[in-house]
Image: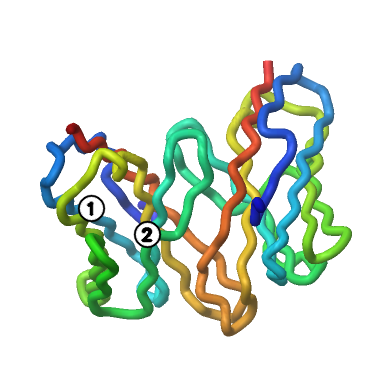
Amino acid sequence: QKEVEQDPGPLSVPEGAIVSLNCTYSNSAFQYFMWYRQYSRKGPELLMYTYSSGNKEDGRFTAQVDKSSKYISLFIRDSQPSDSATYLCAMSDGEGGYQKVTFGTGTKLQVIP
Amino acid sequence: DTAVSQTPKYLVTQMGNDKSIKCEQNLGHDTMYWYKQDSKKFLKIMFSYNNKELIINETVPNRFSPKSPDKAHLNLHINSLELGDSAVYFCASSQKAGAEATGELFFGEGSRLTVL
């Protein structure tokens, strides 16, 4: 079993839809949770960052972490064609310093105008 | 002004050759990384350096040798290239390491290696 599981998609939605992206994980030591966005032929860029459980909102993006269920989500409201990209969840454990970030396999999102 | 830059962006080479990828960051970060992304987009850490010191060394064939001449540079040399080495190699940096590290990474645009 992989430490981080993520549905690879592809996920295709119409412009303006609400998008829900999810990851599950098995390592209960994970404390830092991130979402990265990766456009085609580019490097991943940090989109959202959350420490421990709870919600965090930034514009059209909301990240949720439920540590009891080992489940994290990213919601995108009013999705735009420019949101079309691969979304990678990522997490690190904070143990012993020198964080090692573990990534999900990414979900490819296409927003259709 | 590019924060994390890698060269070359594309590499096409024959099996058995040796190649190097270079990375530089101008963010003033102490920690740098090499990640490998396979054809299924799975991103896996290979190495990490903190202020020129190797701190993470995952299970990677010893044909891969990283080198950090200073904290702003991290290079990757690959000997005796194999077909399975074909992937995109990403350099990344982070501001903090040790107990303060949170996992926020800044990535370069990647170096796409194709081994024929």
Q: Nearer the viewer, residue B21 or B65?
A: B21
Give the alpha-carbon distance from disc 2 to disc 1, as whole Å: 10 Å
The residue indicated by pointer 1 is A21
Q: Residue at x 67, y 33 (%)?
A: B9
The residue indicated by pointer 2 is A35
Q: Residues within 10 Å of mark 1 (few under 14, many from 20)?
A: many
Is residue A52 positioned above or below B41 on the image? below
* Image position, residue A98 (x, y; %): 62, 74
* Image position, residue B107 (x, y; %): 58, 53
Q: Nearer the viewer, residue B16 or A60?
A: A60
Chain letter, disc 1 residue: A
Q: Is residue A76 visible?
A: yes
Where, quadrant-wise, is the C terminus of chain A in this rendering?
top left
Q: Earlier in the sequence, mark 2 or mark 1?
A: 1
Chain letter, disc 2 residue: A
| Helix, strand or loop for disc 1 | strand
On screen, residue B86 versus residue A53, left or right, reads right
Q: Residues within 10 Å of mark 2 (few under 14, many from 20)?
A: many
Q: Quadrant of residue B33?
A: bottom right
* Image position, residue B56 (x, y; %): 68, 63
Q: Quadrant of residue B79?
A: top right
Q: Residue furthest toward the bottom?
A: B99
Q: Quadrant of residue B28?
A: bottom right
| Helix, strand or loop for disc 2 | strand
On screen, residue A19 versus residue A107, left or right, reads left
